Image (tube, rainbow, N blue to C red):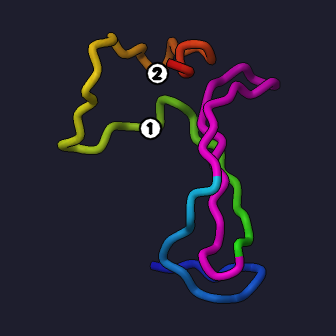
Amino acid sequence: MSITCISCHQATRQLNPAQAEITQQPESGEWGIDLILACPHCGQQYGAWVLNWDIHPLTGMTAKTTSTPIPPCHQTHEGNKQ
């Protein structure tokens, strides 16, 4: 599957990551990932909002940390900065 960029009209199967910030929506108070992705051909940016609990670890990936992770539904902005 591919998408066609609205700016350069090139088909692409991937977008380049430009930003992935963990933020809180002022309207609802929900925490999520503010994503900005860019066309690899012209740099046109596209935005998406993904709620924290919609993000899941990839199978086979493990974190090498000694800290205890905070469950996504209880994360705070300060907790995400660790």
Residue 74 screen position, x and y as percent: 51, 12
Which residue is under mark 1? 55
Specify the farthest residue to the left.
Answer: 60
Q: Which residue is mark 2?
A: 72
The numbered mark, 2 or 1, whose residue comes first in the sequence reads 1
Q: CA distance from mark 2 to mark 1?
A: 9 Å
Question: In the rendered structure, which segment of residues is drawn in magenta?
Answer: 19-42
Q: Position of residue 56 (x, y in %)?
A: 37, 37
In the image, taking residue 28 as reference, residue 14 lies left or right, namely left
Tag 2: amino acid = Pro
25 vs 70: above or below:
below
Residue 26 highlighted magenta (yes or no): yes
**Label 1 near label 2: C-beta < 8 Å?**
yes
Look at the picture and state if 28 lies above or below 67: below
In the picture provided, is 53 more to the left or to the right than 38? left
* Residue type of the residue flagged with mark 1: Ile
Is the residue 36 above or below the residue 54 in the image? below
